[in-house]
């Protein structure tokens, strides 16, 4: 199976996953209360899918995490622009129109705040990945790549994927709601699948043993 990220090489790390499909019905807004229809979300479980990542993409991602300069510039584009404008304001207007120079200093302060926030996140993430065992690190990196590269839309439906591992198998229904955002009905259905029909479904995927590692899906920049 080809790598989901580079689409060129053969994937060496595979995940069994299930699709979660969501349709957002935008409803209708109106001046008159009786004509309003509130927006609703409908969520359903989709197909079982196998998603693979190749070693090169895993290595590349790990390198990016250890040396996050490129990601820094991409993530903090707005901050970099503010910083440059702020610097220009100070250089041109200091001693002439001090109010503009002060505005420039404020922009620089905003930009620096953004940079520090990103950099703190990048360092925490780097630490975390370095502390992982080799296996866990590969797993977390592969899952990160899968989550980012897998299709996110199909027509009007938005899609995300829940990994099926031994850890998932041991989870309770509430955990599916809490960690994977499933509705109560879908959490029930998923739980039944894993403990009943799932065996057959899993064989269809050509998989005889399940993964017992747990993906690191918790780490976000907002931590
Ligand atoms: Zn690849």
Image (cartoon, helix red, strand yellow):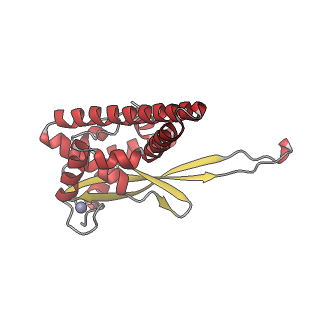
Query: How many labels sit on residues?
Result: 0
Q: Where is residue 150, by image quadrant?
A: bottom left
Coordinates of residue 210 in the picture (x, y in percent) = 22, 47
Which residue is painted at 19% across and 42% down in the image? 137
Q: Is residue 146 above or below residue 84?
A: below
Q: Residue furthest front?
A: 95
Quarter-wise, where is residue 128 in the image?
Answer: top left
For the residue pair 91 and 143, the one nearer the viewer reads as 91
Quadrant of ligand 1 in image: bottom left
User: Which quadrant of the figure contains the C terminus?
Assistant: top left
User: Which sits in the foreground, 116 or 164?
Assistant: 116
> Which corner quadrant of the image does residue 54 belong to?
bottom left
The residue positioned farthest toward the left in the image shown: 134
Give the x, y percent position of residue 187: 45, 41
In the displayed structure, 108 sits above or below 44; it is above
Give the image location of residue 50, x and y in percent: 30, 58
Locate residue 185, reporting x and y percent: 51, 42
Residue 98 seen by the camera: yes
């Amino acid at each position: 199976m080809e790598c989901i990220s580079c689409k060129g090489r053969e994937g060496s790390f595979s995940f069994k996953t299930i699709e979660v499909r969501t349709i957002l019905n935008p409803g209708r807004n109106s001046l008159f209360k009786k004509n309003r229809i509130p927006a609703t979300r409908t969520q359903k479980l989709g197909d079982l899918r196998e998603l693979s990542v190749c070693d090169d993409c895993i290595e590349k991602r790990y390198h990016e995490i250890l040396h996050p300069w490129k990601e820094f510039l991409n993530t903090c584009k707005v901050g970099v622009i503010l910083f440059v404008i702020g610097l220009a304001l100070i250089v041109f207007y200091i001693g002439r129109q001090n109010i503009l120079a002060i505005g420039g200093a404020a922009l620089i302060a905003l930009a620096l705040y953004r940079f520090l926030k990103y950099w703190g996140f990048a360092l925490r993430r780097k630490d975390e990945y370095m502390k992982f065992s080799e296996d866990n690190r590969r797993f977390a990196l592969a899952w990160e790549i899968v989550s980012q590269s897998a299709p996110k839309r199909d027509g009007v439906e938005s899609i995300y994927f829940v990994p099926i591992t031994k850890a998932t198998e041991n989870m309770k229904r509430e955990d599916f709601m809490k960690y994977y955002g499933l509705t109560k009905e879908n959490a029930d259905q998923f739980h039944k699948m894993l403990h009943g029909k799932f065996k057959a479904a899993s064989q269809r995927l050509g998989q005889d043993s399940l993964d017992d590692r747990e993906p690191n899906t918790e780490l976000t920049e907002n931590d």
